[in-house]
Image: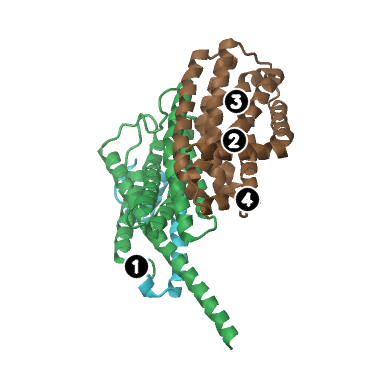
Amino acid sequence: MRGTGTATTRGIGVVALACMAWVVWGGLVATPRDVVQGDAVRIMYVHVPSAWVAYLAFVVTAVASAGLLFGPRRSLGFDRVAGASAEVGVLFMGLTLVTGSLWGRITWGEFWQWDPRLTTTAFLFVTYLGYLAVRGLDGAPEQRARRAAVVALLAVLEIPLVHFSVVLWRSLHQRASVLDPGGDVKLDDLMLFTLFVGVVAFTCLYTWLVLHRSRLAALVEVAGRGELDRAIAARRAEAGA
Amino acid sequence: MKGGLVWAVAARDLRAEARARVTTNQVLPFAGLVMVTFALALDREEVLQRTAGGLVWLATTFSLFVLVQRAFAIETADRALDALRVAGVDLGRVYLGKSIALMVQLFVLECVLVPVAVVLYRVRVDAPGAVLLVTTMICATTGLALVGTLYGGLTVGGAGRETLLPLLVLPVVAPVLIAATRATESALRSGGAAVSEGWAWVGLLAVFAAAFGIAGTLAFGALVDE
Amino acid sequence: MTDAAMRMPGTTVFEMHVFAMDVLAMEDAGFVLGSYALSAVAILALVAATLRRARRLAPLVRDEDKPWT
């Protein structure tokens, strides 16, 4: 009896764990403190990879949605990947916002700033939540998949518009530059390497999670159908007997 | 006659509204009440004067949710949308027709809300500002109506769907809110902004309306499919 | 960083203790460690939930229906 794991996911999992171990060691201990920020810069090693994965997840959801709608085969597998990617994306987007907020608290003194990147990130997060809510609506599988895919592509249209508007909006106020806790950080080789390893680690984690969750979605669907078949068979047996 | 269906749908929606008078009897008082409630919450006159533009558009956005629910309630009431779909009608045209009707209702609402703001929040409008203001109203309302109709089709009917509408619509109309508020502030001279800056924001509103007009026409069919 | 921390955690309990104190003594330790801890907890929670659900459902589905096997 096979679960959702395969040799591939086990391999990816091992790589992810190894890289994560390096990130924790490197981030918390081995890398130096920043000249300006001190130890606060260590949050960068989880915040930046987290943000990268969140945006990656959004792109994957969009591409999978486009694949479902316009691709040659219209397989529901695209829908499962889109959904899994969004679920994982929400997690990392939330982490990005929280870690970014903590980092900002140390560097700027505030938990939140209304700068374009942060604001757009917050909108992206809420948009994800809306997309997942739409996925939860009832309906036939093909229609639900199509509906969700359209909502995802509308989000691709919406997010740049939102970002552009927010950039224009914030340029009216004094701080026109993008506020980034990591903006002034000088990265030495070890820091850069640790950051890179962090990106690899989080990307492996993301891939692992999306593979498992989309397979899980397939299991849910087949198991659900199986239950339906069994219920029908049971009713038939009752009626026959 | 290509455009016929669009205007037919718009006319039907507006006739239904004229008969039921929901906008005039319920939504207008609601919006007016929202404007008053803002004053209760924000308290200081200087604050109200400075934020008057934003408050008008906030009240409009909240009213949008009510109006969208209403626009699609009449569809489910006599299963008109299903009948149209079964008849093989181009749902993109239905979408545009409903958007036009919604836009008209919203515009009427704003024509009332702006004088209310002038009175309650003590702002003034002069001639160049008025031109900017009306243009802003038209462009912003179009954008709001297009987005509202698009996601309204998705969220009508079925349990637990109505509450989804604000969650989906608000992020999408954020650009409209930003641009319309800045343009209105310019028109009312409340933020210290010049009228010329307001026109730049109107440009953004026009782009937004065009983008969602096209996108909505294409996407509406897939979203209302049941 | 003290010399104790620069070396790999040593064999003695004392060295590991000093090393841990070094990590905790960093500025804003709460926020930094909190970020790492929160990330770990969130990720592990999702991983665990995914595996648990898969473990529950996998017996209900025939292996032929699992295209990844």
Drawn colour of chain A?
green
Question: The disc numbered 4 marks a residue on which chain?
Answer: B
- Disc 1 to disc 3, C-alpha distance: 54 Å
Q: Write down the residue under mark 4.
A: B76
Task: Give the number of the mark in front: 3 or 2.
Answer: 2
**Which residue matches tag 1?**
C67
Residue at the image point whose x is 61% and y is 11% from the top: B126
How far, Cα to Cα, is label 1 from label 2? 49 Å
Q: Secondary structure at mark 4?
A: helix
Q: Chain of mark 3?
A: B
| Tag 3 secondary structure | helix
What residue is shown with label 3?
B54
Give x and y (percent) for residue A222: 44, 69
Figure chain in cyan:
C
Q: Are marks 4 and 1 in contact (CB under 8 Å)?
A: no
Q: Is residue B226 visible?
A: yes
Q: CA distance from mark 4 to mark 3?
A: 34 Å
Q: CA distance from mark 4 to mark 2?
A: 17 Å
Circle 1 SS class: loop
Tell me whether circle 3 and circle 2 mark residues in contact (CB < 8 Å).
no
The residue sitting at 57% across, 19% down in the picture is: B133
B23 with respect to A148 (left or right): right
Tell which residue pokes out farthest to the left in this image.
A189
Q: Nearer the viewer, mark 1 or mark 2?
A: 2
Pinpoint the chain carrying mark 1: C
Q: Is residue B177 visible to us here?
A: no
Q: Which mark is residue B101?
A: 2
